[in-house]
Image (cartoon, rainbow, N blue to C red):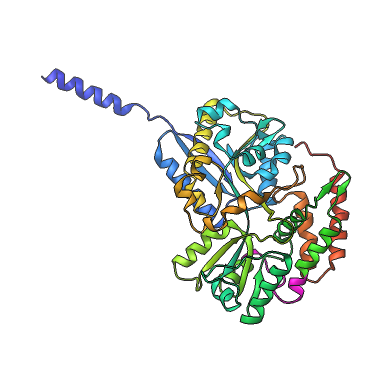
Amino acid sequence: MRIARLFAFLLLTASCSLPAQARTEVRLWTLLGGGDGARMRTMIRDFNASQQEVKVVETVLKWGEPFYTKLITASVVGAGPDVATIHLSRITNLAGGGVLRPIGAEELERAGLRASDFYPRQWHGAQYRGRTYAVPLDLHMLVLYYNKTLARRAGLLDANDRLRPIEGISALTHAFRAVKEHTGEQGMTMESGPNSFAVWRLWLSMLAQQKTPLLGETGLAYGKAGEDSLAVISDWYARGYASRGLDYPASTSQFMSGKAGFMINGVWEVPELAAARKNGTLGFEVGIAPFPRMYGDSSVWGDSHGFAIPANGNRPPPPEKVNAIMRFIAYVGMHSLIWAEGGHVPAYRPVAESAAARSLMPNAMYAGSVEHVIDEPAAWYAGAAGPLQSIASKYLPAALAGQLTTAQALDMFESEAARLLKKRAPQY
């Protein structure tokens, strides 16, 4: 009996002394802040708690050019993260420049993913020269937020307390004017300070609705449509329907404090508004409408987030690290209802087409926008916080502020952009 007990004790102590299997650490860089950042942290926490083999560690960097500059530099010298969130509009630049590592079909399959799991638009946006360089996460676009209290006082709501259809640029201008005249508050708000991107997104939407391309075979091709569209936007500010020079936080604060009838912004503001409504700091009911048809159709600017694996100086990660990365990416896609609650449209079809996702509010209010999203040109200089956007953000907001005329702003934009378009695509 004593021998049996001793044997059992030895087995127990031997098992306790065995080293626990180390978790594979996956370093993730993101550019996600606000509600997006909070939801990503939730998914990372849930993934880490769901299993013991992989641990994702997140680093959040400043959105925009600082993020992409650091990602490019770090990847080139082999010091980048294991995986990063990017905008699919930057695929041509990042994949073409050697910053990203392609993701093989067999790597997707081992993670339980297939191309058919994603909407064709987003999947196509993750491709470069026939190879996959990212796994799409979402689709996000501009929408029209409105303050129901102010819109009601301005006579813009129907019997069901919903915004009456706004069709045509004159009707949109009338809506802004009506809020201003009937309530004394601003008709609309949108970031318009130096280096703002909102006017660029709005301007591209207006061009697309007029079937006018931004680029032609020999360069910029927006012509009179571009000039007239920027003049319309500038006129809203000149007439006092919107406050000049607001940066992003100031523009969203103006709307959330009830000082503007409409807000032109992306769906990513949904969680901030929902949180304010829940904690009682939002003193009005918010409505959201698809971006209005101002001209021939309802085209609207949009982009997508996705997960990509940096090339890291052509130092390929070992297979076990790739498997860990793909396991996390698959988990996020399969649990992206949390992401949808932040206003985005999931790229993973089984979630996006579920009853739970289709019934989400306020998402259902603008669900039809998905069919009208337009992409920026597939060029190395285009995309989120890319060189072309950066040039536009220097000059177009100045027209809204009254610092430059529409013609001057576009002349300066076109002059600098023309030099950019002549440059060769960079190899990092």
Position of 9 relative to 24 (above/below): above
Instruction: Residue 77: tell me if it is visible.
Output: no
Position of 279 relative to 11 (above/below): below
Horizontal relation, residue 370 to residue 336: left or right: right
Q: As rendered, which of 304 and 74 lies closer to the eye?
A: 304
Horizontal relation, residue 421 to residue 353: left or right: right
Q: Which quadrant is the N terminus positioned in?
A: top left
Residue 210 in percent (x, y) is at: 77, 56
Residue 193 in percent (x, y) is at: 72, 66
Q: Residue furthest front?
A: 159
Position of 45 relative to 360 (above/below): above
Q: Which quadrant is the C terminus positioned in?
A: top right
Horizontal relation, residue 7 to residue 281: left or right: left
Position of 297 relative to 244 (above/below): above
Number of marks present in the image shown: 0
Q: Which residues are magenta?
A: 235-250
Horizontal relation, residue 142 to residue 407: left or right: left
Instruction: Residue 302: tell me if it is visible.
Output: yes
Instruction: Tell me which corner region of the image, top left, top right, bottom left or bottom right, holds residue 6.
Output: top left
Q: As rendered, which of 393 and 199 lies closer to the eye?
A: 199
Instruction: Tell me which corner region of the image, top left, top right, bottom left or bottom right, holds residue 246.
Output: bottom right
Instruction: Tell me which corner region of the image, top left, top right, bottom left or bottom right, holds residue 180.
Output: bottom right
Residue 5 in percent (x, y) is at: 15, 22
Q: Residue at x 74, y 57 (%)?
A: 296
Q: Residue at x 21, y 24 (%)?
A: 9
As for residue 242 lying within the magenta part, the answer is yes
Q: As rendered, which of 213 and 310 lies closer to the eye?
A: 213
Residue 242 in percent (x, y) is at: 69, 73
Q: Residue furthest left?
A: 1
